[in-house]
Amino acid sequence: MNAPRILLVDDDLQVSRALRLTLTSAGYVVVEARTGEEALERFQAEGPVDIVLLDLKMPGIGGLEACRRMRKLINIPILVISVLRDPEDRAQALDAGADDYLVKPFGIQELLSHIRTQRQRAAGLE
């Protein structure tokens, strides 16, 4: 069986490095992008991914617009990971097509649980 693939979109190099190491050790293949534009390119060029972890505050088109565009292309789980805590920010992300929202900082087990839950829901819809 192939390892599940995650598209990790975050412009913070330290956060990306820590998440990549954690997710890789948990058995995931991680494809990375630093901007919304790069995320869309990777989303289309790298082949199918099982879930997207998407930061909102990035240079370029940003996470909300990237989420909207990805959602139009394919229906896979999109989990927003953001420092933005305001309920309005969460509502905007969900309205843009995100399936879940996790506020940074978060625990590794919490992140892995959110990923498992979203993948299980997606598998149930197929």
Image (cartoon, rainbow, N blue to C red):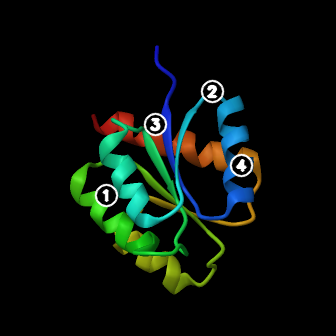
| N-term mark: 4 or 1 | 4
Label 4 element class: helix
Q: Are marks 1 and 3 in contact (CB under 8 Å)?
A: no
Tell me which amino acid carries mark 1.
Met
**The one of 104 and 44 positioned closer to us in this rendering:** 44
Would you name the residue on which mark 2 appears? 27
Give residue 17's mark: 4
The residue under the point 27% across, 34% down is 126
Q: Answer whether labels 3 and 2 touch (C-beta < 8 Å).
A: no
Of callouts 4 and 3, the N-terminal one: 4
Residue that badge 1 annotates: 70
Looking at the image, is mark 3 or mark 2 nearer the viewer?
Answer: 2
Please determine whether, in this image, residue 46 is positioned above or below residue 60.
Answer: above
Task: Characterize the local packing of mark 4: few (<14), some (14-19) or many (20 or more) Cα atoms within 10 angstroms.
Answer: few
Label 4, label 2: how far apart the Cα atoms are? 16 Å
Quick check: 74 left or right of 83? Answer: left
Q: Amino acid at mark 4?
A: Arg
Nearer-N-terminus badge (2/1): 2
The residue at which mark 3 appears reads as: 120
Please state which of the two labelled residues, at mark 1 or mark 3, is closer to the viewer. 1
The residue mark sitting in front, 4 or 3, is: 4
Q: Reading the chain from its start, which is encountered first: label 3 or label 2?
A: 2
Sooner in the amino-acid sequence: mark 1 or mark 3: 1
Residue 62: x %, y % from top left? 45, 74
Cα separation, mark 3 vs mark 2, equals 16 Å
Pinpoint residue 22: horizontal percent, then vertical percent: 72, 40
Query: Under tag 3, what secondary structure?
Result: helix
How far apart, in angstroms, are the residues tagged by discs 1 and 3? Answer: 20 Å
